[in-house]
Image (tube, helix red, strand yellow):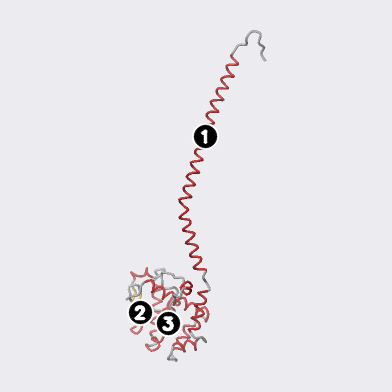
């Protein structure tokens, strides 16, 4: 079993193996998802070696992911950006070898899932069954695909890649989000410094007010004392009291 896999199927022997300790490799860590994924491979194996081996890797893994209800990859690549940079492999070149890196494996599974989902949205949820049915009669996958869908898979792959390319907002949104986060992190020390200065200034103002009130209180006390002394002082001869 590849080191990145949580499950593996041996279609012609009707055996599947699931590593419970690797379920965390699958998004959601669901045993049900892994089981359904591998069962799809067993069902395809029941078609017989001749039909099974005519179906390309992307069809096997894309169909298994769509029918299992959850993608089989953890690192999400921006496929539109990869198309723009001419870094997204073509469907015929997709695959996941035992010694493949985790990122290369995730990219292959993500691309297969994306195209299979595109087929389901464009041609209906029975598209996979129609292709398999046609493949039983046709010796070539391209002809079977054309017979089942009315399109060559290369034509639909071109449309799918164009659709990915027309959605650059994902990259922009991601970059903008990261840029905003970077600005936020960089601004935290400045915000902290500004708040510290503000609190210090408020403390200084409050202290000045307290000192001013204390001085005013002393001055008022002095004035009160003067008034008392003036009241107690006897008037001099010839001085009138008002």
Q: CA distance from mark 1 to mark 3?
A: 79 Å
Q: Nearer the viewer, mark 2 or mark 1?
A: 1
Per the image, the residue denoted by label 2 is: 9
Q: Which quadrant does the C terminus fall into?
A: top right
Q: Is residue 109 above or below residue 188?
A: below
Q: Nearer the viewer, mark 2 or mark 3?
A: 3
Query: Which circle's residue, 2 or 3, is located before the other in the chain?
Result: 2
Residue at figure coordinates x 46%, y 70% from the top left: 78
Can you tell which mark lies on residue 92? 3
Q: Is residue 24 above or below residue 53?
A: above
Percent coordinates x, y for residue 69 in the rendering: 45, 74
Percent coordinates x, y for residue 111 in the rendering: 44, 76
Query: Which circle's residue, 2 or 1, is located before the other in the chain?
Result: 2
**Crowding at label 1, few (<14), some or many (≥20) Cα neighbours within 10 Å?**
few
Q: CA distance from mark 2 to mark 3?
A: 22 Å
Count of labels shown? 3
Task: Single out the residue that lies furthest toward the top.
Answer: 237
Q: Is residue 3 above or below residue 213?
A: below
> Which residue is nearer to you in this view: 127 or 156?
156
Percent coordinates x, y for residue 226 in the rendering: 57, 19
Q: Which quadrant does the N terminus fall into?
A: bottom left
**Crowding at label 2, few (<14), some or many (≥20) Cα neighbours within 10 Å?**
many
Query: Which circle's residue, 1 or 3, is located before the other in the chain?
Result: 3
Secondary structure under tag 2 reads strand
Per the image, the residue denoted by label 1 is: 208
Secondary structure under tag 1 reads helix
Q: Within the image, what quadrant is residue 113 found in? A: bottom left
């Amino acid at each position: 079993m590849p080191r990145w896999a949580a499950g593996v199927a041996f279609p012609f022997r009707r055996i599947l193996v699931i590593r419970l300790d690797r379920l965390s490799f699958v998004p959601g860590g669901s045993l049900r998802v892994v089981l359904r994924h591998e069962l799809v491979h067993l069902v395809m194996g029941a078609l017989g070696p001749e039909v099974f081996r005519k179906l390309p890797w992307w069809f096997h893994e894309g169909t298994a992911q769509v029918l299992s209800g959850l993608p089989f990859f953890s690192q999400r690549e921006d496929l539109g950006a990869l198309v723009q940079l001419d870094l997204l492999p073509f469907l015929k070149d997709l695959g996941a070898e035992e010694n493949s890196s985790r990122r290369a494996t995730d990219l292959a599974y993500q691309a297969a899932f994306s195209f299979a989902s595109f087929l389901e949205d464009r041609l209906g949820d029975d598209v996979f069954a129609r292709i398999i049915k046609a493949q039983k009669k046709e010796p070539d996958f391209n002809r079977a695909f054309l017979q089942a869908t009315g399109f060559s898979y290369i034509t639909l792959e071109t449309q799918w890649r164009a659709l990915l390319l027309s959605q650059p907002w994902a990259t922009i949104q991601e970059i903008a989000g990261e840029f905003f986060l970077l600005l936020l992190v960089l601004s935290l020390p400045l915000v902290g410094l500004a708040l510290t200065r503000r609190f210090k200034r408020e403390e200084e103002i409050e202290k000045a007010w307290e000192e001013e009130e204390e001085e005013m209180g002393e001055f008022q006390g002095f004035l009160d004392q003067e008034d008392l002394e003036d009241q107690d002082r006897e008037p001099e001869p010839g001085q009138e009291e008002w």
